Structures are given as structure tokens and as C-alpha cells.
């Protein structure tokens, strides 16, 4: 089933970085897009899934894809998947950049890759040979040797991703070539209405499968091996609803598990980046494995959302494996979910199958509704009338103390997420249950679908 949205980067010239492991592809990728997006380490084969981002140079943008290295024991189980990822990127390429190591020189792996690029791609599209790690004049001299020219890709362009040496000149050459292509660099305006959506869950709940279904391409590696996804991967989509175009950025994240089970630097770094992605997102898709009981880790992730005040949709994945697909069964599961996640009672629940796409695309209109609800601002006049009716329906219940509380008013002090300030009489306190009652009444009267409400109590002075 095709996705109802389109990937925005498809309108830009695409540059693909290729090269053997540890030549610094991820480092130069981060430097060119000016973001610390790709995970960088000295461990060969750190990158598995292609990284994608946009380069902004002299006011216009092009699209950049960083591919994974194959030559490492770390990625032995993923060689075929990484190769498919690289081949997919090369099919999209308007320009290929082969990255080598100026310090080490040309290795047999470089010669094999260059041979493939010359025979398969060079006659169709431009291929730049770039020698990275040329951190000084003395190292740059290494790139003048005959071994570099024997690759058949012309003279190497010496650069340093570490200190930025010659990168400006390289970008000028790159953009000059892009301006000859069918797709030209474009000036892209930032969309203030952009919705940032992070897909979150414990390992192996189907986050990457869901991500691929949402964007309509196999952009991230899917595997039953825990922690296959090492770093967040995002794709910007354009979705049209009611004749209005909406920009949605989906972020696939590494599975988050208990600290005691985390092994190695790469997994720890991946989880840290997952949490950072959650912090900067507007909406979180919390994916739960519908074929398993709710786990302690699921609950901990739910608690993380409560602390971050994020809008949320709970996705019960692998529903295709359910023996009973009746409405009664779904309602039973919903009651169970809300019992385990009482603080997420505002979150809609969808039953999906990321594997075969069942109900996956229902996520799109729901995200638009939630994004709009998150920005809801209630006029003060309506809030005053709301509070008057609420108090009349149910008198405030007191907390600690003997005096009956008196609510003096309520104001909305923020949106995205909505924050309210409730004023109560001096030397009185309000019971928590009454605050919950006011929240429920707000939800019934106004549209706050999938969105947390924050109600702060302020005691009036004498």
C-alpha cells in the first residue's frame, strides 16, 4: 500500500557518499549538513542505515546521503542489508562522492569500489574522488601520488572533515556540477507548521518496519536482531489533508531498554540520541508489541512521555498476529493499556500491523488533528464561562486544611503544549481529584486529542 505522503527531499539534487569503513564518511556528512546527526566512532562499521540530510550552501540546498561501510565484523550479519541500502542510494544519486583516506592511502577495497564506480556509474553521472583527513599540507602531498590517478576518477580533492580544510572549495565544485543537472539546488523556506514525530519503543517492537511503511520506502534496515537501529533516522514528508499541505518529519529511533541490559558505547550513544529525539519532537508514536504482555520497559517509556509533556499516539503493533480481532477484544485491550498507562489516558490507541501495513496510514490524519489540538488557545471569555459551569456542576473539593477552596479564575498561559493557571483563594488548597475533574471537563468541551494538559495552581495573595 502506497503512502499518502511524499518525501520532500526528492525535489533536490542528491549527493551520495560512498567509501570503505573508517574513511570518515559520517564525520564529513555531519560537517557538510552542519548538524551532529550521524553517530561517529572509531569502531569500523558504525553506520548501518544510510544517513540523510540537506546541505545549505550560499543560500540553496542539496540532499546528501551517507552510506554504511561493509568491511567490519561488527556488521557481518547486516552485509546484505547495508549493500541494498547503498545500492538504493546510488540509484537516487545525481552525483557520487567516493571518499578515501589521505593519511593511509589507497587500499585494495578502494580499488575495487573505484572499479565498480567507473564501470557502472561514471558514464551516467559525475563521480568525485575526495581524499579525507588531509589535515595539513604534508598529508595533502600524499594525494599527488600515481596510485590515486590509477583509480580512473581523476585527481583527488583533498579535504579535512575534522578541521574543515578545503571544504568550501569542494562545495563550490559540487554545486557547480549540481547546476548542470536536471534537478537544481533550491532555496527552501522553513515551514513553521512542521510537525516533528518520533517513533519510540523498546527493541524489536517494529519501529523500523512502521517507519518504512509510513514513508513508503525501505530506508531503514529491519531485522529481528535487537538494536539493529543504532541512531535516529529522519525523513521529511508532505501530506495533504482538506486541500492543505502539511510537513511531517518522522524519526525512527534505536530501541530503548533498561540500563542494566545496555552493552557497549554504540548502544548507549544510540539510546541517548533516541531520548534527544523525543525531547525535540511534538508528537510521539509509542509502539507496543501486541503479541506480548505489557512489560516494565513499556511502562518506563510511558513514564518518560509524562515527564516530557509530549502529545502521543499508542500503536498496538503486530495486530495481524491476534487470534481475536473483534471490537470486544480491542476494547478489552484498550482498557488494559489505559490501566497500565493512566497518565496517557489522553492518547488515542490504534491497532496496526507495520509488517503488512494494516491501518498504518490512519496515523496521518490523526497526527494533523493532534498537532492542531496541541496549539489550541481558548479565549478568556470562553474559559470564564467554562469555569463558572464547571464549579456549578461540581463544587471544588478541598485538599489539606479545613477551609473550603474557592476558585477565583482560570487562564491559559501557553500553548504547544496547553498550560493553564488556576487561581484559588488564599490559605486554601484544592484536592488533586478536582484538578483531574477540571482537566476532563476541558477535554470534553474543547479538542485536545492526544495532547497533555498542564494545570498549575496559584494561590491568590490577601
Image (cartoon, rainbow, N blue to C red):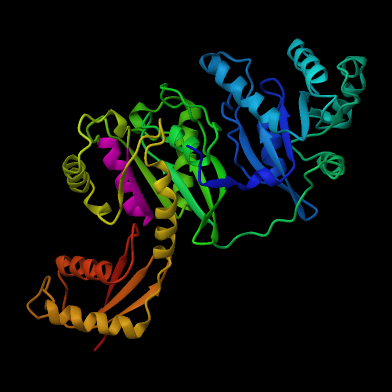
Q: x and y percent of residue 41 in the render? A: 60, 29
Q: Does the rendering let one see residue 424?
A: no
Q: x and y percent of residue 160 in the render? A: 78, 34
In this picture, is 144 found above or below 346? above
In this picture, is 148 found above or below 361? above
Q: Of all residues shown, which one is farthest toward the top?
A: 108
What residue sits 38% from the left and 28% below the top? 204
What residue sits 31% from the left and 75% below the top? 421
> Was residue 388 drawn as part of the magenta stretch in this picture?
no
Q: Is the stretch drawn in magenta largely helix, strand or loop? A: helix
Q: Nearer the viewer, residue 304 or 362?
A: 362
Q: Nearer the viewer, residue 284 or 121?
A: 121
Q: Nearer the viewer, residue 19 or 273?
A: 19
**Position of 259 compared to 332: left or right?**
right
Q: Of all residues shown, which one is farthest toward the bottom?
A: 462
**Position of 110 compared to 408: left or right?**
right
Q: What span is in magenta?
A: 296-316
Q: Of all residues shown, which one is farthest toward the left?
A: 402
How many marks the image carries: the answer is: 0
Q: x and y percent of residue 297 in the render? A: 29, 36
What residue sits 30% from the left and 34% below the top? 319
Amino acid at each position: 500500500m502506497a503512502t499518502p505522503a511524499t518525501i520532500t527531499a526528492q525535489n533536490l539534487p542528491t549527493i551520495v557518499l560512498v567509501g570503505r569503513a573508517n574513511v570518515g564518511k559520517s564525520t564529513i556528512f555531519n560537517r557538510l549538513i552542519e548538524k551532529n546527526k550521524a553517530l561517529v566512532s572509531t569502531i569500523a562499521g558504525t553506520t548501518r542505515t544510510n544517513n540523510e540530510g540537506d546541505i545549505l550552501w550560499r543560500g540553496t540546498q542539496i540532499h546528501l546521503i551517507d552510506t554504511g561501510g561493509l568491511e567490519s565484523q561488527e556488521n557481518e550479519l547486516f552485509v546484505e542489508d547495508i549493500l541494498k541500502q547503498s545500492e538504493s542510494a546510488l540509484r537516487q544519486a545525481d552525483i557520487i562522492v567516493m571518499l578515501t583516506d589521505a593519511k593511509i592511502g589507497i587500499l585494495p577495497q578502494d580499488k575495487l569500489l573505484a572499479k565498480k564506480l567507473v564501470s557502472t556509474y561514471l558514464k551516467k553521472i559525475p563521480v568525485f574522488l575526495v581524499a579525507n583527513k588531509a589535515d595539513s599540507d604534508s598529508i595533502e602531498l600524499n594525494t599527488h601520488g600515481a596510485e590515486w590517478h590509477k583509480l580512473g576518477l581523476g585527481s583527488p580533492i583533498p579535504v579535512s572533515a575534522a578541521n574543515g580544510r578545503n571544504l568550501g572549495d569542494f562545495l563550490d565544485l559540487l554545486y557547480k556540477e549540481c547546476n548542470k543537472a536536471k534537478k537544481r539546488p533550491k532555496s527552501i523556506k522553513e515551514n513553521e507548521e512542521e510537525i516533528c514525530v518520533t517513533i519510540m519503543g523498546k527493541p524489536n517492537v517494529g519501529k523500523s518496519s512502521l517507519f518504512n511503511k509510513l514513508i513508503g520506502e525501505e530506508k531503514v534496515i529491519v531485522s529481528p536482531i535487537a538494536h539493529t537501529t543504532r541512531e535516529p533516522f529522519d525523513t521529511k514528508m508532505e501530506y495533504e489533508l482538506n486541500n492543505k499541505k502539511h510537513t511531517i518529519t518522522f524519526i525512527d529511533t534505536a530501541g530503548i531498554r533498561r540500563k542494566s541490559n545496555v552493552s557497549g558505547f554504540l548502544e548507549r550513544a544510540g539510546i541517548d540520541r533516541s531520548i534527544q529525539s523525543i525531547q525535540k519532537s511534538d508528537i510521539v508514536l509509542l509502539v507496543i508489541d501486541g503479541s506480548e504482555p505489557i512489560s516494565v520497559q513499556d511502562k518506563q517509556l510511558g513514564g518518560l512521555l509524562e515527564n516530557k509533556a509530549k502529545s502521543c499516539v499508542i500503536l498496538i503493533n503486530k495486530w495481524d498476529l491476534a487470534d481475536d480481532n473483534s471490537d470486544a477484544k480491542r476494547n478489552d485491550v484498550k482498557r488494559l493499556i489505559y490501566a497500565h498507562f493512566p497518565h496517557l489516558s489522553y492518547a488515542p490507541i490504534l491497532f496496526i500491523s507495520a509488517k503488512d501495513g494494516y491501518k498504518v496510514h490512519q496515523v496521518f490524519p490523526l497526527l494533523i488533528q493532534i498537532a492542531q489540538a496541541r496549539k489550541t488557545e481558548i479565549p478568556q471569555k470562553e474559559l470564564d464561562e467554562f469555569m463558572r459551569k464547571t464549579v456549578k456542576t461540581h463544587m471544588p473539593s478541598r485538599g489539606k486544611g479545613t477551609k473550603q477552596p474557592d476558585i477565583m479564575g482560570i487562564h491559559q498561559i501557553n500553548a504547544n503544549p496547553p498550560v493553564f493557571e488556576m487561581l484559588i483563594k488564599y490559605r486554601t488548597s484544592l484536592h488533586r481529584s478536582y484538578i483531574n475533574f477540571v482537566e476532563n471537563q476541558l477535554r470534553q468541551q474543547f479538542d485536545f486529542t492526544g495532547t497533555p494538559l498542564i494545570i498549575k495552581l496559584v494561590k491568590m495573595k490577601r
